[in-house]
Amino acid sequence: MTADTLRKLYLEFFKSKGHAIISGASLIPENDPTVLFTTAGMHPLVPYLMGEKHPAGTRLVNVQKCVRTGDIDAVGDASHLTFFEMLGNWSLGDYFKKEAIEWSYEFLTEKLGFSPDKIYVTVFEGEDDIPADEESVEVWKSLGIPESRIFRLPKEDNWWGPAGQTGPCGPDTEMFIEMDKPKCGADCRPGCHCGKYVEIWNDVFMQYNKREDGSYELLKQHNVDTGMGLERTICMMNGLETVYDTELFVPIVEKIKELSAGRPSDEDAAVRSERIIADHIRTAVFILGDPRAEVRPGNLGANYVLRRLIRSSVRHAKALEIKEGYSVKLAEIIIEEYKAAYPELEEKRDFILSELSQEEERFAKTLASGQREFDKTVGALLKHGQNIISGRLAFKLYDTYGFPLEFTEDLAAEVGLEVDREGYNAAFKKHQELSKKGEGVFKGGLADHSDKTTALHSATHLLHKALKNVLGDHINQRGSNITADRLRFDFSHPAKMTPEEIQQVEDTVNKVIEADLPVTVDVMTMEEAQEAGAIALFSGKYDEKLKVYTIGDFSKEACGGPHVERTGGMGRFRILKEESSSAGVRRIRAVLES
C-alpha cells in the first residue's frame, strides 16, 4: 500500500461515516504560544474542541502535517521521526466512544485487512480521582476482543493531551497489532518496546480540560480525537521492518548512499547517520515549505529548531564524507515525492533550496571556527600538563559551534585527552531547562478563551488591516502569537517602520476600537471568502467552508475565532516594539491597556 492510497482510503472511509474532509493546518500553530510546532492533528482544532462551532460541522477528517522534536535524539532508530503525517477524525460533541471504537475496528479489519486475532488494545485504568474507562472495555468486548487482549494501563500509557500546557485532554484506547515474533519476557504486553506489539491507532476521548493549576474539569462537550501515523501504518501494511524502508524514504536514502564517498567501519553508525540525514532534511523541507508561515534558520524558537535539524544533518553528512550541497539534492527528491499531496512545496521550491544551501554554508564556517577554538584550548591544556577537557568547554563547542559530544571526544582522543562527559551532561541538562522556558512556552494559548486573549485576538485583525492601510497591500501575516498579556504579529515588509508609521497604525486601530464597531461572523466557502475580499492566506479546497469575521466596515478576515462581539471596551492599543523577525519579515509586539 502506498501513502497516496492510504490517505485516500482513510478520508473516503470517514466521509462515508458523515465526516467532512478538511484541509490540514500550518505546521506553525496560529496564536498558540504554548508550543513551537503543530504536534498533532487535534492541535489546530482546539477552539472547536472547547466549544467553538466548526464551519464544516461536528464530524471532521483530515491529514495533518506534524513536527515533534521531543524525541529528536532518538531519531535514527527504526521508527522515530521528527516530521510525520497524522490521519485523524474528530467528533465535536457528536458521537463518542462506541462509534469511534467500532469504526476504528472496522477500518483496521475490513479496509486494511488486519486479522481480528492480531488486535490487542489498551484502556485507561483510572488515576487522580478520574475513573477507569470501563465503557471502552465493554465496547471492545462487544466487538469480540477478549479480556485477555484488553490491557488496563495508567495515565502515562493511556491518557492524551493537552497539546500544550492547558486544554482538552482525556483517556484513550490504543490499538496494537501483534507481530510474528516471541515475547521479550513474561511481562511483555502492548506498549512494550521490544517490537512484539506495534501501536497502529489511538482513539482519544476528550472529556476533560486541564487548567493552569494542573487540575481537571469536565468539558461542556465530549469530543473524540483519533490519530493514525501514516508512515508507521504503511510500514506495517507492507511488512517492512522500519519506516525508512517505505517508499517515502527509500529514494532519499538511496541518494544519500550515492553521495557518500566513504563509510564508517561501524555499519550501525552509518545506517543511523543515513536515517538522521533523511529525516532531518525532510522535516526541514516541510518547515521551510509551510504556506502560512515563513520560518528560516535562526537562533530562537522554531527558527532554532530548523537550524538544529539542518546542522545535525550536516554533521552526519560529514561522517559519511558527503560534500557540501547535498541538502539541496535531497530536497529536490522530497519536493518531487510530495508535491502532488502538498503543492505548497513546489510553490516554495526556490525558497526551500536557497535557505538550505545558505545554512549549509554558514555552518561550514562555524565548524571551522569551532576547530580553531578546539585547537587553541587543547594547546593550553597540553602546555599545562592537563589531560581532561571540561564538560563546560565540551558543551560550549556543542552549543556555539555545533560540535556533538562524540565529535569532541574523537578529536580529544587523537591528542591523548579525555572529555568530562558527566560535566557535559550537567551543562546540557541546564541548557534544556532554560530552552524550555525560553522557546515560547508560555501560559495561555488556544485553550485560553479569557476576555484578554479574545480581545487580543481581535486586535490582531485590526492591526493586520491597519498595516495594509498604512504600508500597502503587500502586507501579509507571517505568524502571530498571543498570551494573556500581549500579542506578537509577524508580517511581510522589506523595511523598518518609521516612528510616524507606527503612530499612524496605533491611531488607526484605536479609532476602530473607540467606534465600538460590531463583530459578525459568516460561514462561507474559500472561493466566496476571496470574492468577498476577506484577508487570508488561502490554501486548501475552494469548496471548503471557513469562518469570516467582519469588524464593522473596517476589516474582513478568515479566522477560526474567538473574537469580541464589539470593539468598544477592548482597551487602548499600544505598540511596544517593532523589529526584524527575519529577512523581509517584521515583528510587532503590542498590548491592550485598560
Image (tube, rainbow, N blue to C red):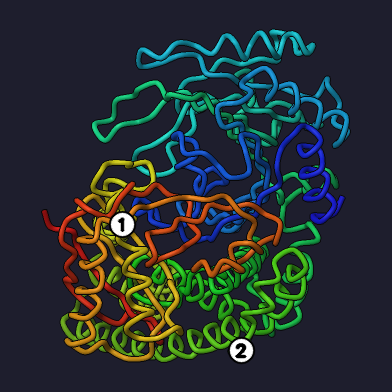
Q: Position of residue 510 (x, y in %)?
A: 20, 66
- Residue 390 seen in the figure: no
Residue drawn 63% across and 52% down? 545
Q: Residue furthest left?
A: 594
- Spatial CA distance of label 2 from label 1 is 54 Å
Q: Nearer the viewer, residue 113 or 515?
A: 515
Disc 1 secondary structure class:
loop
Q: Amino acid at mark 1?
A: Leu
Viewer-nearest of labels 2 and 1? Answer: 1
Q: Nearer the viewer, residue 570 or 490?
A: 570
Residue 528, picture quadrant: bottom right
User: Mark 2 = which residue?
Assistant: 325
Q: Residues within 10 Å of mark 2 (few under 14, many from 20)?
A: some
Residue drawn 45% across and 55% down? 549
Left or right: 467, with 83 as reference point: left
Q: Position of residue 238 (x, y in %)?
A: 85, 47
Q: Residues within 10 Å of mark 1 (few under 14, many from 20)?
A: some
Q: Amino acid at mark 2?
A: Gly
Disc 2 secondary structure class:
loop
- The circle drawn on residue 517 is 1
Residue drawn 35% across and 86% down? 471
Residue drawn 46% across and 34% down? 51
